[in-house]
Amino acid sequence: MRWFLGLPLLFLGAATAAAQDLTLPSGQTVTLAEVIFEEDGALARFRFLAPRIGADLTFPDVAGDFPWLCEQAIVPALAVAEAAAERVVISMADRPVEFGEITPDATQFFEAFSLSDGVCIWDEF
């Protein structure tokens, strides 16, 4: 099931309802672009627009943003939505990218996490 979230505030829940954009520990601001549920809902992909990556932020600069997003935004959002995802893939792209399409000019970073009792556990690709 693919969700194009025109209503990211609803999905992100009350903790982030004040703004559509999220400011992360790195200082960058990202916007939720899309959520895709796969594998009968066991896998949830959260795709964020992060215009500063590749320009002035490298992966080491934003590596800490991924667990923060998982723990502070995604786990609570899944609870509000009563979604039972077992794994989460978080992606950041410097521009809109169609899911599954190769876009050589785009900078994209990905991290995956398993979820266990509301805890994000980093999964090495």
Image: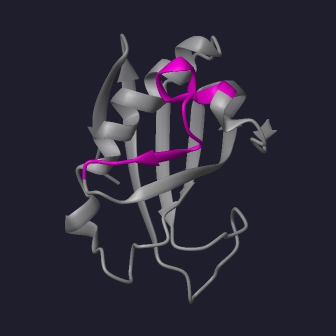
In this rendering, position of residue 26 left or right of residue 53: left
User: Looking at the figure, which quarter contains the N terminus?
Assistant: top right
Q: How far from the left and from the top, in percent, is residue 15?
A: 47, 22
Point out the stretch of residues depicted in magenta: 10-25
Residue at the spot 73% in from the left edge and 67% down from the top edge: 98
- Is 20 part of what is drawn in magenta? yes
Rendered view: 124 above or below 110: above
Q: Of residues 101 and 6, which is closer to you in this image? A: 6
50 relative to 21, above or below: below
Residue pictured at 47% horizontal, 78% vertical: 107
**Residue 45 falls inside the magenta stretch:** no
Residue 39 position (above or below residue 49): above
**Placement of the C terminus among the 4 image quadrants:** bottom left
Number of dots carrying numbers: 0
Residue at coordinates 78% horizontally, 42% vertically from top-left?
6
**Residue 14's spot in the image, x, y percent?**
54, 18
Q: Is residue 106 left or right of residue 25?
A: right
Residue 95 coordinates in the image, percent (x, y): 60, 73
- Colour convention of the picture: one colour
Residue drawn where x is 59% and y is 36% of the image: 44
Is 17 positioned to the left or the right of 123 in the image?
right
